[in-house]
Amino acid sequence: MDTSEGKRTSVDLLHEVPLFGGLEDEDLARLAQLMTEKHYKKDSVVISVEDPGDALYVVSEGEVKVSLWSDSGREIILSTLGSGAFFGELSLVDGEPRSANVTCTSDSLILRLSRKEFLKVIRSYPSIAINVMTEVCVRLRRADESIGNLALLDVYGRVARYLIEMSEESGEDVPEGIIIRKMPTQQHIASRIGTSRETVSRALSEFQRRGFIEQRGRGMLVREELDVKAVSRAR
């Protein structure tokens, strides 16, 4: 791993991983020695459904998507994970095969910790086990919310909810509202909320016509008037 001046070291990265919260630099340095790194090109598959659950992965650079494929061949994106995020923890805990596919959405550098080493780390640092349970709870709550949105909101409502969540997570406050600097593709949004790209396009056009959103180069301005109730009134 690169430890040259001006570049982030492995310890710097692991400081950002919630799973390893509370560990001292010395402990993180020892942990980093147990991990291997691998470069992946965009669209490369890191793990697939039913692969053995034999390792934990941390995104050092780049971004990955967690997804499933329906019987009809449609991809359903469950989440996207950027630098500092980790995946593969469920299989490490229960020993079952992988429950989803993970694919790089950009050139990425991924760190890998084998299940054998992970279990050793758990024994040495019990706080990590608590962090695992905390993160599993967070992800289960998000999954429950997504299921609720699919059941209770129409498609326009789901598009609005997605934009609002993006605004809260990665938006930048400006006088007119919140700007999302890096908008995902319409196909990506469709795969996240369980609909077609054409429907997402229609919803965005309607939101723009009503003044809820505004295209800003490659980004998007989301105004505070955009909410699920406003969208339902717009239909």
Image (cartoon, rainbow, N blue to C red):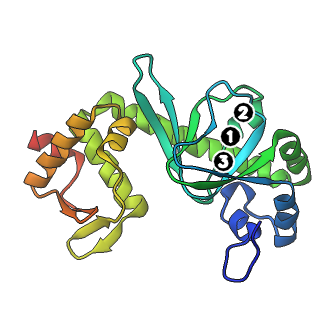
Q: 30 or 20, which lies in front? A: 30
Asked whether the beta carbons under mark 2 and mark 1 sit within 8 Å of each other, the answer is: yes
Residue in the picture at 91% in, 53% down: 124
Residue 2, percent from left and from top? 75, 70
Which mark identifies residue 183? Answer: none
Please tell me whether mark 3 sits on a helix, a strand or a loop.
helix
Residue 132, percent from left and from top? 71, 46
Residue in the picture at 38% in, 60% down: 168
Give me the C-alpha separation between circle 2 and circle 3.
16 Å
Which image quadrant: the N terminus? bottom right
Residue in the picture at 47% in, 35% down: 144
203 lies left or right of 117: left
**Circle 2: residue type:** Ser
Give me the C-alpha separation between circle 3 and circle 1.
15 Å
**Circle 3: residue type:** Thr
Q: Say whether disc 2 or disc 3 marks the residue closer to the N-terminus.
A: 2
Which mark identifies residue 88? Answer: 1
The residue that disc 3 covers is 134
Residue 61, percent from left and from top? 60, 60
Which image quadrant: the C terminus? top left
Q: Quadrant of residue 12?
A: bottom right
Asked whether the beta carbons under mark 3 and mark 1 sit within 8 Å of each other, the answer is: no
Give me the C-alpha separation between circle 2 and circle 1.
6 Å
Q: Is residue 233 above or below residue 58?
A: above
Q: Nearer the viewer, mark 3 or mark 1?
A: 1
The residue that disc 2 covers is 91
